[in-house]
Image: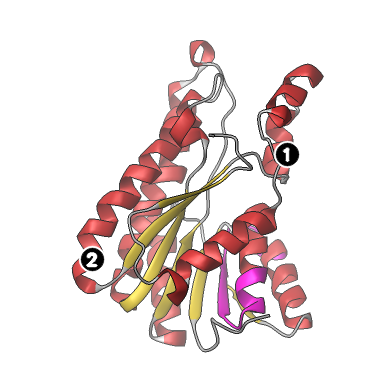
Amino acid sequence: MDQQYSGKVVVVTGASSGIGSEIARELARRGASVILVARREDRLAQLSEEISGEGGQALAMPCDVTDDQSVNALAKAVREAFGRIHLLVNNAGRELTVPLAVMKPAAARELLDVNVVAMAEVTRCFLSLLKRGAAVVNMASAGGLRGAAGLSMYCASKGAVISLTRSLAKELAAQAIRVNAVAPGMIKTEMADRMLQKLKPDQVAELEAAHPLGFGTPQDVARAVAFLGSEDASWITGHTLVVDGGFTA
C-alpha cells in the first residue's frame, strides 16, 4: 500500500463502526497516525488493537460530538499529543427512517444536531490545528442530492452537509485548507441494515436495482475519503464526490 499518509495525523469521527472504522483502517494502511473518535470506548479500543495488529498506528479518544465540553476536551488532547492534524474526517452521523407525517420534532432536531451542528462544531474546534495544506472531508449522502421517501429529514441533513462543505471551502481557502464531501449511495453497514429492515423485500430489491453496480462497501467510501484528503486532490475543494454505484445517474 502506498504510504502517502506517512507522518500525517488524521482524526476520524464516528470511527467505531461501519464506514468510519473502514476509513480509519484505510488511512492507517497508508501510513497515517489515526485518532479514533466515537462514543463507544470498547469498540474504539478493539479497532485500535486491530489496526496496531496490522502494523498501523491508532489512538482511541472517546468523545460525544454533540457535547461541547467533550469536543473541546478532544481538541485539547489532540493538540497536546500531536500539535496539529493534516486531515479531519467528519463521519459521525445518524439515520432516521420516518415518514414526515409521523415525525417527532425532537427526533428531527436531534438528527440535525448530530449530522450538521456537531459537524460544524467539531470543525470549528479543530481549526487552529489545521495548518496550510490540511484537509477536511465531510460525510454526506446521495440522499442529500436526490432525496428519498421516508428519509426527508435525513436527506435534508445531508443536503445541509453539502452546503456547509461548499461554504467552508470558500471560507478556509485563504488558509489553503481544502474542504470536500463524499456522498455515498447504499453501503453495506449496520446503519444500512437498520434502514433496510424497515422496508419490504420488494422495496429492498428495487433499491438495489437502482444502484447499477449494486450496493457498495465501506472500503469503496474509505478509498474516496483517502483520495480527497491526500495531495493527489490538492486542487480540489468545495466538491462532493458521489460514490454510489450509479444511483444518482
Query: How far across and how far down the image is residue 167, in percent?
Result: 26, 51
Q: Is residue 119 visible?
A: yes
Q: How far from the left and from the top, in percent, is residue 90?
A: 47, 57
Q: Is residue 73 left or right of residue 42?
A: left
SS class, disc 1: loop
Q: Residue furthest bottom?
A: 7
Kindly report the distance in space between the C-alpha atoms of the residues bearing marks 1 and 2.
Answer: 36 Å
Location of mark 1 (residue): 214
Q: Is residue 30 magenta?
A: yes
**Left or right position of 202 against 151:** right
Q: Position of residue 207 (x, y in %)?
A: 69, 27
Instruction: Tell me which residue sits at (37%, 66%) in the image.
Output: 72
Secondary element at tag 2: helix
Instruction: Read off the magenta span.
Output: 25-42
The quadrant the C terminus occupies is top right
Q: Residue 190, relative to residue 149: is it above or below?
A: below
> Looking at this view, is 166 or 157 the one in front?
166
Query: Of the residues shown, which amino acid type is indicated by label 2?
Result: Ala
**Which kind of residue does numbered mark 1 sit on?**
Gly
Labels 1 and 2: the sequence-earlier one: 2
What residue is shown with label 2? 173
- Write the residue at 76% across / 28% down: 197
